[in-house]
Image (cartoon, coloured by chain):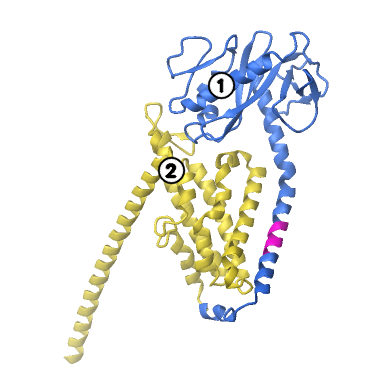
Amino acid sequence: MNTTNTKVQNQEPSSRRLVMSMAIAGFISGVIIIAIYVLTFDTIKENKARELREAVFKVLPDLSHMQKLHFQDNKLVIVKSDGMDDEMIFSGYDKDDNFVGYAIQGKAPGFQDTVHILFGYLVSNSTITGMQVLDSRETPGLGDKIFKDMDFVNEFVNLPMTKNIKAVKKGTKTHDNEIDAITGATISSKVVVKIINQSFNKWSTRLPQQGNEPALELQETKVNQQ
Amino acid sequence: MATDVSAYEEMIKGLWRDNPVFVQVLGMCPMLAVTNSAINAVVMGLATFFVLVGSSFLVSSFKTFIPKQVRISLYIIIIATFVTVVDYSLLAILPAIHKELGAFIPLIVANCMILGRQEAFASKHNVKYAVMDAVGMSGGFLIAMLALGSVREILGVGALFGVDLFGSNFEPWVIMILPPGGFLTLGLLLLFFNWFTERRRQFLIKVADADRVLAVEKVDAQGVKDNG
């Protein structure tokens, strides 16, 4: 079986044939890659948008609606675009369209790659209501505990934000503004805390006075999850 | 033309005798990088399975059109196309898994096991054998990945496929899910595999010897009978 096939290629093919076969293969491969990109593009975009929406509904309690806000010209403007940038936050509303709180995003370099998180903030009593990691490449099994270890995630539920929070060694938490870091993932834990402090300090001065929150206009309703 | 028995043999050899990881020691990069949990290892194994079977099929189908001077580049183009398809499909269908494997999917292109099979087997055999060989090899790769991933997850996290095995009293060996744990486990598994193969070989030699003795005795008995 082996000998019959090698015979065919015994004579030297011309350079033109070599170039042509590479070009044809490259062309076909290009067409396939473009096709799969076009085919999956919408689903991928939808997945990302849904993930973000679900995260907003997770970090703020009792939400029914949300809208995107963009900070420009020193005020918050309601936007509808699908895009997402660092100057964007989300406001959440309950079922009677009353304002609940903000979901603020932030990112910083983690142990391996940028960690991107979203946290809910209640203006009325200045507390953090929850934290979700949107994107990270932390070490599987260690750093990824920042979103897999529920004990750690739950520390960010009802966390008073009167002053900057601090990550301390696990079990040595003594103050309200301290967070028990994850054993073996101190850097990742500290990054989460750092992002929250940074974004909080950045946004606390930008948010409008209590009572002047933007009203619900372009509502994105909670997806029914059973 | 060989029978179906040899096609079956082409498949089965990848699982054990010529296992790509334990015998050929190929594809070490994904092997060490993604085996920190059993589920990651399985998904990586399945992605590799798809890429290897697909590209073996194509390479074998077009082997007469592929000029041997540019064959490696053409193999890489074929493999890279399959990998891109897998990458985008995973991102669309299983975003959670893609999040876990993220950076490692594109690295399948550089998995020398896949290129090695094209060069050593698919380009020289017809489609049926090439596909059988690819199925066997990637099956063997999957088994090896699963073995490594399970050991590391059990010792490093105290769980298997995310299910807690030992309760809260178990202190996980964090080192096992870090890169050194990968090397340690791989080394120990290779040791075990070689020890087992050697033992089996010795056993087979013994059996063969016993057979020969029996056969000789039989011939002798026959001879005695004939002469008598």
Span of residues in magenta = A25-31
Picture coordinates of residue B77, whole percent (x, y) = 62, 60
Q: Is residue A27 magenta?
A: yes
Nearer to us: label 1 or label 2: 1
Front residue (pair B11, A209):
A209
Element carrying mark 2: helix
Q: Which chain has been coloured yellow in this picture? A: B
Asked where in the image residue A66 lies, by quadrant, the reply is: top right
Q: Is residue B220 left or right of residue B146?
A: left
Q: Which chain letter goes with mark 2? A: B
Task: Give the overall secondary structure of the magenta segment.
Answer: helix
What subunit carries mark 1? A
User: Residue at image x 64%, y 10%?
Assistant: A126
Q: Marks 2 and 1: in contact by CB < 8 Å?
A: no
Residue B8 horizontal/vertical position (percent): 49, 67
Query: Is residue A225 visible to the viewer in this orientation of the structure?
Result: no
How crowded is the residue under tag 1: few (<14 C-alpha within 10 Å), some, or many (20+)?
some
Secondary structure category for the residue under label 1: helix
Q: How many marks?
A: 2
Image height check: is B142 above or below B130? Answer: above
Residue nearer the viewer, A117 or B91:
A117
Q: Give the blue chain's letter.
A: A
On the picture, is B79 further left or further right than A174? right
Who's the residue at 77% across and 13% down the image? A213
**Which circle marks residue B150 in the picture?**
2
Q: CA distance from mark 1 to mark 2?
A: 35 Å
Q: Amino acid at mark 1?
A: Lys
Q: Which residue is mark 1?
A: A194
Within-10-Å neighbours for mark 2: few <14, some 14–19, many 20+: many
